[in-house]
Image (cartoon, helix red, strand yellow):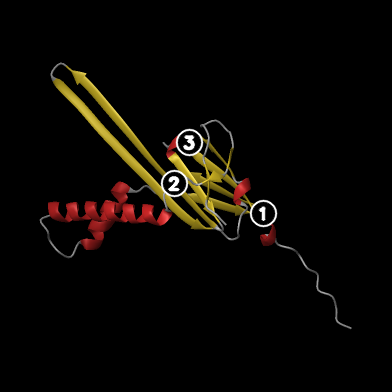
Amino acid sequence: MTAQTATAMQPAQTSAVAKPAATENPFDRMQEMYDTIAKRAFEIFDNNGRWFGNELSDWLQAESQLLHPVHLEIAESDEVLTVRAEVPGFTAKELDIQVEGNRLIIAGKHESKEESTKGKTIYSERCSKEIFRSVQLPSDVDSSKVNASLKDGVLNIELPKAPHSKSVHIEPKAAS
């Protein structure tokens, strides 16, 4: 099965259909994020006087500064998996949703810039936050029928199950 991407639409309650992924490999993205966190952790280590013994706390501090958690709620029925993800502050264009087999990847990057000039004083501030969440789903999904919508910072993704993964109730018969 090939990777598919569903782009969440505008903040109004709208839906999108999955389309072929045009983004980079998720493993490359994870490696890039690992490198960014490692660089920030070293900066923290360096700024704290290069004292050893705080590697884990430096790493966790760097991780918390660069990545923001994506809280998920996954519901399953006989026909569909429904994923509800909290992504406050992100627009539909900043989110990237990939589905392949039974793996769902939600990624996004939000950058904001604020500038003001008063006389000779210039103020400029930049803020960036990034999310990345990879989840193994309980069953394979039909990636050609995935729908996603974004409303009030909540991303809803409907993932229809692949035909072979639907559960069937079987009544046992008494042997004669």
Q: Nearer the viewer, residue 102 or 157?
A: 102
Is disc 1 surrounded by few (<14), some (14 to 19) or many (20+) residues within 10 Å?
few
Q: Earlier in the sequence, mark 2 or mark 1?
A: 2
Residue at 42%, 54% (x, y): give it.
26
Q: Earlier in the sequence, mark 1 or mark 3?
A: 1
Q: Secondary structure at mark 3?
A: helix
Query: Please, what is the three-letter code of the amino acid marked with disc 1?
Result: Ser
Residue at 31%, 47% (x, y): give it.
66
> Circle 3 is placed at which residue position?
92
The dot on residue 23 is: 2
Q: Which x, y percent locates residue 21? A: 50, 47
Q: Secondary structure at mark 2?
A: loop
Q: Quadrant of the C terminus?
A: bottom right
Q: CA distance from mark 2 to mark 1?
A: 30 Å
> Circle 1 is placed at which residue position?
77
Residue at 25%, 25% (x, y): give it.
115
Contact check, label 1 and label 3, Cβ < 8 Å: no
Q: Residue furthest left?
A: 49
Q: Earlier in the sequence, mark 3 or mark 2?
A: 2
